[in-house]
């Protein structure tokens, strides 16, 4: 079976989980990948057939998504990006004729499928916003952000054949052709041996988080910080805080051995922390409802708590409550990627039967 796989480039979580799915599909199918931004670079390191396309991006400032800057940024870049995508679509059609399209919130592959009447399967976590019913405590105070996000998500990948939504929380499904499946985890996480050490694993950028060092120093526990000092080539220690350059192997080791995790609201790291049984302090990006939603479900499940900013009080309160959160998250279990990949295989098998009939 020939499969076109599209990966959105905004946020590396899409690329990380898509790598897992593409590797699994490639064992039995011919897969061609299209991706934008950093996702393309990441996937090109793992696969041969990865085409670069243009994709939408978000503009950030002070730990918030800036809507106006995002609009201007994409209008400016889209002048060249959209025509280039049109030409790429024509070239792709000339040399590849897929039987199915799989899209991780990516519009180019989806458009290709619709133009050529090829079934499209959506595999991502963001469709959760529009295709599930959320309790009032999840949307309280951010109702406007929720309504905007829901409309945007509804407008993307309209009328796909099916929607597989990866998740570690399970609200009521409110739309047809939708299945909630466990988070897709990279093999490095599945192979990790979790234990509870003394340190906090912190993944935060410096943008909008200038008070982070002060907040961590006041926590009274060792902190291993990633993402904050992008200039580093080796670890650098400042009191109880050690800043690390990004190294995937070391990061996974520090995550698996952490006492608890301080992170944003990005789905991938939250789902990895939950799988490894780590309490979470989530500090989601303001104005990005998907991150707020993920963080609030962490809190609703008792796996951790949410803060708008990393303050000494927020971090100290989290550390004091970490044992309680650890007890709750210890009850989470999933059988690796077995359930999710099996669900995708069943959908593709159904498409294959229709193609061959």
Image: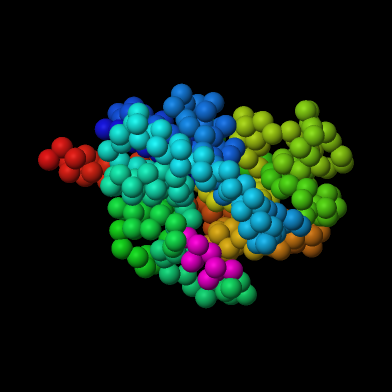
When the figure is inspected, residue 261 is found, relative to residue 256, above or below; the finding is: below
When the figure is inspected, residue 29 is found, relative to residue 101, above or below; the finding is: above
The residue at the far left in this view is: 357
Magenta stretch, residue numbers = 145-153
- Main SS of the magenta part reads helix
Residue 273 in view: no
Q: Considering depth in this image, is 124 or 32 the residue closer to the camera?
A: 32
Residue 151 part of the magenta-drawn span: yes
When the figure is inspected, residue 231 is found, relative to residue 55, above or below; the finding is: above
Q: Quadrant of the N terminus?
A: top left
Q: Quadrant of the C terminus?
A: top left
x 61%, y 52%: residue: 74
Does 246 sit left or right of 88 as displayed? right
Residue 143 in view: yes
Task: Return the x and y of residue 177 as percentages of the image width and height.
Answer: 30, 58
Q: Considering depth in this image, is 37 or 93 the residue closer to the camera?
A: 93
Task: Return the x and y of residue 126 as percentages of the image width and height.
Answer: 48, 55
Q: Considering depth in this image, is 43 or 329 the residue closer to the camera?
A: 43
Residue 233 lies in quadrant = top right
Task: Return the x and y of residue 102 as percentages of the image width and height.
Answer: 37, 43
x 35%, y 31%: residue: 94
Residue 174 lies in quadrant = bottom left
x 59%, y 68%: residue: 145
Q: How are the colours assigned in the image?
A: rainbow
Does 30 sit left or right of 80 as displayed? left
Q: Considering depth in this image, is 181 or 354 the residue closer to the camera?
A: 354
Task: Return the x and y of residue 116 as percentages of the image width and height.
Answer: 30, 44
Does 138 sit left or right of 181 as displayed? right
Residue 76 part of the magenta-drawn span: no
x 35%, y 28%: residue: 95
Q: How many numbered discs sit on the rendered protein? A: 0
Does 34 sit left or right of 327 as displayed? left
């Amino acid at each position: 079976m020939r499969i076109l796989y599209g990966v959105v480039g905004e946020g590396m979580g899409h690329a990380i989980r898509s790598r897992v799915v593409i590797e699994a599909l490639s064992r039995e199918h011919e897969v061609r990948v299209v991706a934008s931004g950093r996702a393309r670079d990441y996937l090109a390191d793992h696969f041969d057939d990865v085409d670069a396309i243009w994709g939408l991006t978000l503009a950030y400032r002070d730990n918030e998504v800036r809507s106006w800057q995002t609009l201007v940024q994409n209008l400016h870049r889209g002048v060249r990006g959209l025509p280039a995508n049109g030409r790429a679509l024509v070239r792709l059609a000339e040399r590849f004729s897929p039987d199915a399209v799989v899209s991780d919130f990516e519009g180019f592959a989806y458009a290709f499928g619709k133009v050529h009447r090829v079934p499209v399967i959506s595999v991502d976590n963001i469709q959760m916003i529009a295709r599930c019913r959320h309790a009032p405590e999840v949307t309280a105070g951010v109702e406007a952000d929720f309504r905007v996000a829901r409309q945007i998500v509804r407008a993307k990948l309209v009328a796909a054949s099916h929607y597989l939504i990866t998740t570690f929380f399970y609200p009521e499904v409110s739309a047809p052709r939708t299945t909630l499946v466990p988070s897709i985890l990279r093999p490095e996480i599945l192979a990790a041996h979790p234990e509870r050490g003394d340190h906090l694993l912190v993944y935060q950028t410096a943008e909008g988080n200038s008070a982070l060092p002060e907040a961590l120093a006041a926590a009274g526990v060792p902190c291993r910080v990633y993402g904050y000092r992008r200039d580093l080539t080796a670890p650098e220690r400042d009191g109880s805080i050690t800043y690390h350059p990004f190294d995937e192997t070391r990061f996974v080791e520090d995550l698996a051995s952490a006492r608890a995790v301080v992170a944003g609201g990005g789905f991938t790291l939250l789902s990895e922390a939950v799988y490894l049984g780590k309490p979470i302090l989530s500090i989601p990006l303001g104005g990005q409802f998907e991150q707020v939603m993920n963080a609030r479900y962490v809190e609703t499940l008792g796996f951790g708590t949410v803060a708008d900013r990393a303050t000494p009080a927020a971090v100290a309160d989290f550390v004091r409550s970490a044992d309680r959160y650890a007890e709750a998250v210890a009850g989470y279990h999933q059988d690796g990627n077995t359930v999710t990949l099996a669900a995708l295989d069943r959908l593709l098998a159904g498409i294959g039967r229709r193609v061959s009939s």
